[in-house]
Image (spheres, helix red, strand yellow):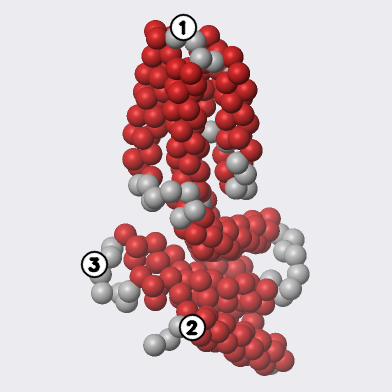
Amino acid sequence: MITLASRCRRNIAIIVLAAILGGLVYTIYSLSLRHTSFISGWTLFLIMLALALYNARKKLPFMPWANSSTWLQFHIYAGFFTFVLFLFHVKFRVPNGTLEATLAFLYLGVFGSGIVGLLISRSIPRRLTTRGEEIIFERIPVFQRRLREALEQLVSRALKETRSLPIAELYAKRLLPFFAGPRHFWWHLVQSNRPRYALLNELEAFNRYMTPEEQEIAAQIAALITTKDDLDYHYVHQAVLKYWLFIHIPLTYSLLLFSLLHGVMVYAFIGRI
């Protein structure tokens, strides 16, 4: 059985070999005074088109087009190979034309967003296992509403049974905004618990002024704060994993369209010579 590490080494070796062979072909054609840009351009376009089909493969899982894991591996390593082709195609220089610069910008956007997607798809699932059980992304708003309702019941109980002003004051100033929806996006993304501890410390600071009944309610509120913070953590990371495609895919299709336009203009220019 092929391990993940050995498969990665094999795929990297294939990419390196393909890059070396591509460099040799590019050098040979350059010496023969042929248009190397046509070869690198068409090869780059066809590979990008094949990479774009991965999105269609995910939407049609019943089609017999190899399994999703094979497609993903091809998508990753062929994507890296396109960067080599891109450098050959632009002749290792910064494009200066408007269309060429736009194409370069779009390609780098697609490549860069692909790298980001690879990193987050490897790191985020591991992160999520450290903060409670797995939660379905679409169900998170339901859990948030239930936590908010539980908090409101506790605060209402505190006012009726103990007339607790500290809990009511903290609820109005800090707890109500915190439980209104997902909070602390960037703090969760950098895996910092600072906002959670700040809120819990504020609640604990009121303990000296509370009766035993109020302290019991405050302990339940503290548990809700911890649960809500974990829920926000899941929301933030799953949202990043879900919505980065809204950057990567539109850039990909834009790149393909502009590449076709670039090809049409190149052949039209040659036809007028």
Hey, which residue is sitting farthest left in the picture? 62
| SS under mark 2 | helix
Which of the two labelled residues, at mark 2 and mark 3, occupies the earlier sequence position? 2
- Whole-angstrom CA distance, mark 1 to mark 3, is 61 Å
Does residue 67 appear left or right of residue 85 in this picture?
left
Label 2, label 1: how many angstroms apart (C-alpha)? 65 Å
Specify the quadrant of the image occupied by residue 227: top left
Whole-number angstrom distance, CA of label 2 to CA of label 3: 26 Å
- Circle 1: element type: loop
Say the numbered circle drawn on residue 62.
Answer: 3
Q: Which residue is mark 2?
A: 7
Q: For mark 3, does the 10 Å Cα neighbourhood hold few (<14), some (14 to 19), or many (20 or more) residues?
A: few
Residue 131, given in percent of the width and then of the height, sits at: 48, 49
Q: Nearer the viewer, mark 2 or mark 1?
A: 1
126, above or below 223, in the image: below
Label ID, residue 163: 1
Could you tell me if residue 176 is visible in this image? no
Residue 166 falls left or right of residue 145: right
Which amino acid does the dot numbered 1 rest on?
Arg
Q: Is residue 68 left or right of residue 242?
A: left
Of residues 222 and 91, the one drawn nearer to the viewer in this rendering: 222
Name the residue at 64% across, 89% down: 20
Give the residue at x 57% y 39%: 185
On the question of residue 198 being in view, the answer is yes
- Looking at the picture, how far across and down is residue 184, in whole percent? 57, 36
Q: Which mark is residue 264?
A: none
CB under 8 Å between callouts 2 and 3?
Answer: no
**Mark 1 crowdedness (10 Å alpha carbons): few <14, some 14-19, many ≥20:** some
